[in-house]
Image (cartoon, rainbow, N blue to C red):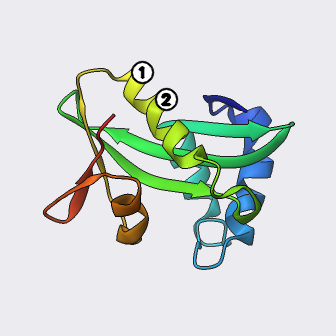
């Protein structure tokens, strides 16, 4: 497993295809794709590769050093259950030590399962 920072010229095509294949994610639709590609390049974006296959990613925002907000976390269905999401969060925590990280989520059960603490309407990521 390799987790690294997103590089548009290398990662974009496979990442956009992964999003397009995911039910309920519309970032790859014609209306949103160009804006989302811009967002990927201007966010804290990590990608996870297993045997040269992009299998997951996270996209986060830095609130000027106050907090980090995780906007998107996605792992391909065939790779779920292998702690890839947790490893992506770990890279974020390693790169921004001492900053509080929150997850903006509509899949609360996942974050509760991995032990994140619900604070109001977001989850605080604990290492």
- Point out the image quarter for the N terminus: top right
Q: Which mark is residue 95?
A: 1
Q: Foreground: 83 or 63?
A: 83
Can residue 31 be seen here? The reply is yes
Tag 2 near tag 1, CB within 8 Å? yes
Q: CA distance from mark 2 to mark 1?
A: 6 Å
The residue at the point 22 percent across, 27 percent down is 65
Image x and y of residue 25, in percent: 58, 72
Counting from the top left corner in percent of width and height, residue 66 is at: 17, 32
| Label 2 packing within 10 angstroms: few (<14), some (14-19), many (20+) | some
Which quarter of the picture shows residue 95? top left
Q: Is residue 42 shown to the viewer in this render?
A: no
Q: Which mark is residue 47?
A: none
Instruction: Indicate whether 116 appears above or below 112.
Output: above
Q: Quadrant of the C terminus?
A: top left
Identify the residue position indicated by label 2 in the image. 91
Q: Residue 35: horizontal and vertical position, in percent?
A: 55, 56
For the residue labelled by badge 2, is the local secondary structure a helix, a strand or a loop? Answer: helix
């Amino acid at each position: 497993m390799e987790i690294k920072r997103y590089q548009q010229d290398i990662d974009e095509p496979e990442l956009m295809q992964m999003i397009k294949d995911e039910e309920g994610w519309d970032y790859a639709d014609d209306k949103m794709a160009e804006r989302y590609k811009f967002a990927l390049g201007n966010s804290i974006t990590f990608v996870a590769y297993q045997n040269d296959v992009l299998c997951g990613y996270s996209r986060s925002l830095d609130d000027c050093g106050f907090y980090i907000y995780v906007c998107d976390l996605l792992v391909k269905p065939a790779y779920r259950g292998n702690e890839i999401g947790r490893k992506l969060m770990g890279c974020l925590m390693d790169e921004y030590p001492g900053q509080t990280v929150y997850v903006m989520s509509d899949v609360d059960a996942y974050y509760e399962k991995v032990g994140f603490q619900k604070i109001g309407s977001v989850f605080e990521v604990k290492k």
